[in-house]
Amino acid sequence: YNGAMSSSGGPFTSLVVSRPTEAITHVELNRPEKRNAMNRAFWSEMVDCFNQIADDPECRVVVVSGAGKIFTAGIDLMDMASDVLQPEGDDTARQSWNMRKIITKYQETFSVIEKCPKPVLVAVHGACVGGGVDLITACDIRLCTQDAWFQIKEVDIGLAADVGTLQRLPKVIGSRSLVNELALTARKLYADEAKSCGLVSRVFMDKEVMMAAAMEMAGEIACRSPVATQGTKINLIYSRDHSVAEGLDYMATWNMSMLQTQDVMKSAQAAMEKKSLKTVPFSKL
Amino acid sequence: YNGAMSSSGGPFTSLVVSRPTEAITHVELNRPEKRNAMNRAFWSEMVDCFNQIADDPECRVVVVSGAGKIFTAGIDLMDMASDVLQPEGDDTARQSWNMRKIITKYQETFSVIEKCPKPVLVAVHGACVGGGVDLITACDIRLCTQDAWFQIKEVDIGLAADVGTLQRLPKVIGSRSLVNELALTARKLYADEAKSCGLVSRVFMDKEVMMAAAMEMAGEIACRSPVATQGTKINLIYSRDHSVAEGLDYMATWNMSMLQTQDVMKSAQAAMEKKSLKTVPFSKL
Amino acid sequence: YNGAMSSSGGPFTSLVVSRPTEAITHVELNRPEKRNAMNRAFWSEMVDCFNQIADDPECRVVVVSGAGKIFTAGIDLMDMASDVLQPEGDDTARQSWNMRKIITKYQETFSVIEKCPKPVLVAVHGACVGGGVDLITACDIRLCTQDAWFQIKEVDIGLAADVGTLQRLPKVIGSRSLVNELALTARKLYADEAKSCGLVSRVFMDKEVMMAAAMEMAGEIACRSPVATQGTKINLIYSRDHSVAEGLDYMATWNMSMLQTQDVMKSAQAAMEKKSLKTVPFSKL
Amino acid sequence: YNGAMSSSGGPFTSLVVSRPTEAITHVELNRPEKRNAMNRAFWSEMVDCFNQIADDPECRVVVVSGAGKIFTAGIDLMDMASDVLQPEGDDTARQSWNMRKIITKYQETFSVIEKCPKPVLVAVHGACVGGGVDLITACDIRLCTQDAWFQIKEVDIGLAADVGTLQRLPKVIGSRSLVNELALTARKLYADEAKSCGLVSRVFMDKEVMMAAAMEMAGEIACRSPVATQGTKINLIYSRDHSVAEGLDYMATWNMSMLQTQDVMKSAQAAMEKKSLKTVPFSKL
Amino acid sequence: YNGAMSSSGGPFTSLVVSRPTEAITHVELNRPEKRNAMNRAFWSEMVDCFNQIADDPECRVVVVSGAGKIFTAGIDLMDMASDVLQPEGDDTARQSWNMRKIITKYQETFSVIEKCPKPVLVAVHGACVGGGVDLITACDIRLCTQDAWFQIKEVDIGLAADVGTLQRLPKVIGSRSLVNELALTARKLYADEAKSCGLVSRVFMDKEVMMAAAMEMAGEIACRSPVATQGTKINLIYSRDHSVAEGLDYMATWNMSMLQTQDVMKSAQAAMEKKSLKTVPFSKL
Amino acid sequence: YNGAMSSSGGPFTSLVVSRPTEAITHVELNRPEKRNAMNRAFWSEMVDCFNQIADDPECRVVVVSGAGKIFTAGIDLMDMASDVLQPEGDDTARQSWNMRKIITKYQETFSVIEKCPKPVLVAVHGACVGGGVDLITACDIRLCTQDAWFQIKEVDIGLAADVGTLQRLPKVIGSRSLVNELALTARKLYADEAKSCGLVSRVFMDKEVMMAAAMEMAGEIACRSPVATQGTKINLIYSRDHSVAEGLDYMATWNMSMLQTQDVMKSAQAAMEKKSLKTVPFSKL
């Protein structure tokens, strides 16, 4: 994927972006020597990266994973502390004003995943800590290995998580008691409980098996009509934040044009002819 | 149930409506030779059927099931294709306008289940595909057999599901990761996973056992005060789409009159006398 | 906890409030001879009790449990019947008006738990019936014993639950099918199913073990920064009732000042020095 | 307009529907001998009438006015009293249940005006009392004569207005102080104040002048692209009930197809050639 | 009005509460020597006062006015400065936490006016500055004298108004351009412009004339059914904060019981007999 | 204002940005020979311009006006037609997809005005057509000359306005009847009616007088605490889109830190010393 570049013009330093197939983009957290800790570069490169993906008509699905021994250790406090601990400003109001700008900017780092219309799978192995939980709750499908564990770390350092976990996790899993327990005690959640509470939809033996399965699942999504899959993502997210009646109204307004696609005929024909959708060439979107 | 009729005046052709007891209405999808595929008649008969049920003061609970080998194969594309694939209109705007009217009308086919104040149980055996998932997510309680499976089929034919699944399923089950995976890959969900994710609340050995249990559960609901059970349904649906504070306000406003019923005294007395509620005659509603 | 008093000036008669540690408040339902049935005193003492806790700068976490053989049998109908069954008023409108005032007041009995910014754990043993379910769904973390069971009792006495269960339970657990079944049939939910559906996050062998674990978990919360834990509770509840975008905006506005706390530095330092947070003295809040 | 019929098969008895031009439908309240009081027939004929208009592809705009000396005296209490005063039911809960069904049905009588996508002008002369205010606030554009007056009459007969005035009027005019005063004191609002507060957008000397102007304004709307005017109405109503951000999102989703119309080219060409839009033939919608 | 007392047990010191008739409560800001500046006592006495009014079954309407030369000079900075300027707390987070408690408490001072179901008229003469604007925008009907002027003073002392003006004023008047101008420049708004923009619904020559008119208008409201007037207020406020569809649903649920009142028959009979409503004895509410 | 540059690196071609004083930024639409028609450059330069202003700590207020004979003729159809009329894409769904991206991008052109926390005044002379109305409704304060007129032009060219007018205008002025009339008939609104309906808050004799007054008003805002004025703007916009209760909660959370500013003391001192705020040096924000 040659085009991947940070907004400052050079290549990404915290991410590796590759293209296993034309339609699948693989984004890898890539500071393995730092346990993929989220440093200053990461927070802005994610925004550039997902904005580029959103605008790339060839890409139909994204897989996110971490290089090295664990998925991510979360925020790189060494690199970020000055931002977070000492906001500029002549008085409390001004320091707070600047702090709010910083938080809002950091929230965007994960919100871009959600705004990107391509479905995003995330494959977690080993630890997924702090900012890692913010990241994965903004993805669409979560997979993990047997040895994975998850930890909402923020209360341990004296703050309420503020870049997505408290907002998205309760809408992602099916036990508010568990959400509250995790967020208030910072205890670890292991793979089995992550599966039974619905945080991940599948657990795999090891990273290799998981990555193969993730790519296969990505392939299943990539071979389907992008009009269908991306419309599905957009409307699922819309529904989360609206009443059923509003979701239905939006859906009808969305599909009044989106059903008018050759993809329906192409898909239906493949179904009748018992052909795999992987053989069907859909126009790019 | 003699009164059941389509709005065109004749009997239903896609549904059979019966009355196992005075208070229970049984609606059966009844095109077994077509695997209960949802044809043109079905989409309008459901509306007539549930509007009649809503206005029937004797009926206190509804059971929906499918005749024949499976629950439903979903939309009958052969019968419906002209509607969906070739909306009328002199230009794109007009075709889209007409498409929106069609989608809105089809959405109503399942929304009537929700608008009907009587609790609706659905009992699924075998396959429940495409439109079937739209249907069951609009019901209140879901049961299934061991051999049941569920499939959000729409992405396979190039479209985003638009008559309820994307709006209701995420509010029905406890894993958004799973919802997204099912909707984006069209993979099958089998009974065990349906139970563990909360799509169904009970799984039964076979259809016969399930139907007996469904009728028994329907009987449990039917013997209770209709003021209580129908008020419960209405407020549960209201709560889904509102904040807790708004739900509480609505509930207080609802119950300021609904608690003023003889049913409370009758129920309390039965409880004190250790009598079954099945022996208590509540007035019709 | 010497200060605990009802608003009428005397000590509580339905609750016992104690202080296992300075930072943990233990609220015990305490009418064991009446199976902790919720009598007139209870409904107002809860409000006084949690308002006092909310204003107590030493308290950082609350544990709720029941004295005697069971958690609670729910509303004490003998004591309350006159309120609920015979609202005053010269005509139906006026009786309804007064009924609404009563319901609104009773709703407040459990809403105070949610409005109190300190995290609230509830530990259930034996039966938790009717009003008990309203109570526990307003708490943040739910634990129970193996022998615990839960029952939404209201439909059995002819009314739709109106002090919180229908509003909060569907947002607490991950299966709407199960919520509806429980609310419409009044069937019992046992500990195992309560765990698998997410109503409770942990199940314990017996009450003794559970209380020890509850106190330990409370200790884990109490030793963390109160700025962090109380901000977490407030924002988790805000998120439940708002879209993700609104939740993020509120969170950023909240944390623009709440991150400016010595607790971050104290916590970070403890982490670097591998010290337990229990050794860190945070200022009161 | 030959097709106009009540759902019971006969012609309307409370309304006269005519067709001044092919694209303009004129609905006249037509019980002048009863001061156009809203009797039982009226409440259901309005629904039939506006549903037919909504489905009529030729009609592009609607004008509503009243025959005889005044616009309307409001509800015909003589004809309606049994409905409103004595709802059926064995106890208060059941009477309330039936009352709610009645109110909901009556609300629909005016909501159909809003759901009909064709712009609706209403021209008021003389008195517009009670139900008349409910009616006109559901219309899009309000005109009146110098001698017109408006009165929210409900508090005078012991009830809070419940079929639209309290919901729509505050969103229609620019002074909440005035809305409250009118609704709480039932005082008359005369034409000049109706203009200055924004209830009507124009005042005319007498009915004849007003009807001519109403028809001219209707003609201005009717000659424009129906894709444009009906999309405008739908989005204006959507915006009223949503935040600006949500309104913009819906608008973009709406127009992604609705801009793809020949009407844009036809309209632009007429503009360049300085031709009147009245000479441009738009396809029906 | 003998019962009027502050929560500390003594009589009010900042307010005088009287009873011109049994059904009308007159609340007078009463620190004329301090230009009715809002001191510490005022902020809590208003809460006690309106809570007592809300629970007083005889009172049907409230009139608020100011003693002495002007309505109010707004907050009494001398008395309040310590609260607002130096919140307690060991760090910024804790000071902010306490500041938020203070603001929330002060917001309640005016929100009680809105929560009180009795209609509240406010009569303004002379200056209405700062907190005065917060106060009057929480009332239902606003009247003023020719010499009255209004000023949103907060930006002049370096803060954004936070006890109601910024939230309520834009929903009270019909020009957002004017709202913004007033709030951002702190310029005075005089009676004529207050009338034309809709802030007040009537302007009077002097205070005496205004008070007579206010009492007459209060009498008009007081003589009507309290079920009708208080239901009207509650639903008008509900509608302000909800969509039209939600407002209609709430209204129907409200009136299903509230129409079942003898007041309808009494009112209708008075109308038929051409008797004044002032002669009709309605039961208290 | 030397820093003003388009994102492509060169100076703006459709705008002139100047700095009458350090705290006031003046943005002038500057294609007078084209009647300030909004060409391709304009749509993106506005975004760059207001993002730069938002981040400029010196700027405290913005004035927008138009160079030449009129404010703006609206969209430059010649320059923009290819975008709007012929979206790319292999089928209707894909063309619609691209159209939605375009509309969303154009909406941002005016939404940046609202997202910029500095108050924005707009001064209109002569014509303000089509896109001009979208622009001014996103500003905070609107002024105009006697000869100004406003026109929602979109229906004249076959489309529903989709970059802000239909969403914002109804929340800006106090007569929905007038909004609908203007949007559906494209009739001109002249200065006097613009004033009486509240679209503008002041009308001036000619452009020179208006610009002087605009700069004076800008000066009044600029001399006040930026913590106060920008917090006021942000909360006024928040309130527009939320209920009063939500607005109050957000305001309290905002001000818990924003009241902790030296500006309060500085402002209060100036007031006590009767000094103009123009002499008070506030820190930049």
Image (spheres, coloured by chain):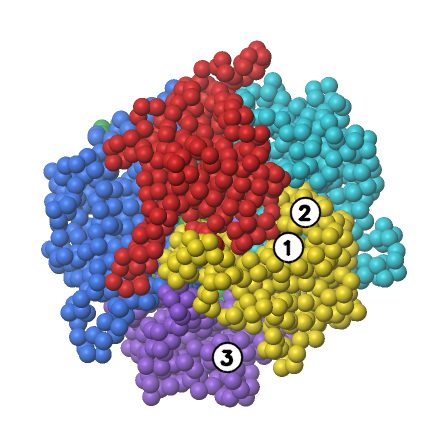
Chain colours: A blue, B purple, C green, D yellow, E cyan, F red
| Residue F218 percent across, percent down from the top left | 49, 25
Q: Is residue D117 left or right of residue E252?
A: left
Residue at (28% x, 64% y) in the render? F91
Label 1: element kind = strand
Q: Which amino acid type is shown beneath numbered disc 1? A: Arg
Quote the CA–CA distance across marks 2 and 3.
48 Å
Quadrant, the C terminus of chain C: top left
| x and y, in percent, of residue A91 in the image | 41, 21
Q: Chain of mark 1?
A: D
Rendered location of residue D39, percent (x, y): 72, 70
Image disc number at residue D142: 1
**From what the image shows, is residue A130 above or below residue B73?**
above
**Disc number at residue B49?**
3
Amino acid type at circle 2 is Lys
Residue drawn where x is 25% and y is 55% of the image: A118
Q: Amino acid at mark 3?
A: Cys
Q: Whole-Å distance between the Cαs marked 2 and 1?
A: 10 Å
Decide: few, some or many residues near mark 1? Use Cα within 10 Å; few <14, some 14-19, many ≥20.
many
Could you say whether the residue bearing mark 2 is in a helix, strand or loop?
A: helix
In the displayed structure image, the side of residue E285 where residue A2 appears, left or right:
left
| Front one among F166 and A164 | F166
Disc 2: which residue: D195
Give the residue displayed 21% in from the left and 59% down from the top. A284
The image position of residue B277, as x and y in percent, is: 57, 74
Indicate left or right for D51 with C256 as reference.
Answer: right
- Name the quadrant containing residue D80: bottom right
Work out whether residue C223 or residue D226 is closer to the camera in this orientation and state it: D226
2 vs 3, front mark? 2
Q: Are marks 1 and 3 on the same chain?
A: no
Q: Which residue appears farthest toward the top when viewing the image?
A: F273
Mark 3 element type: helix
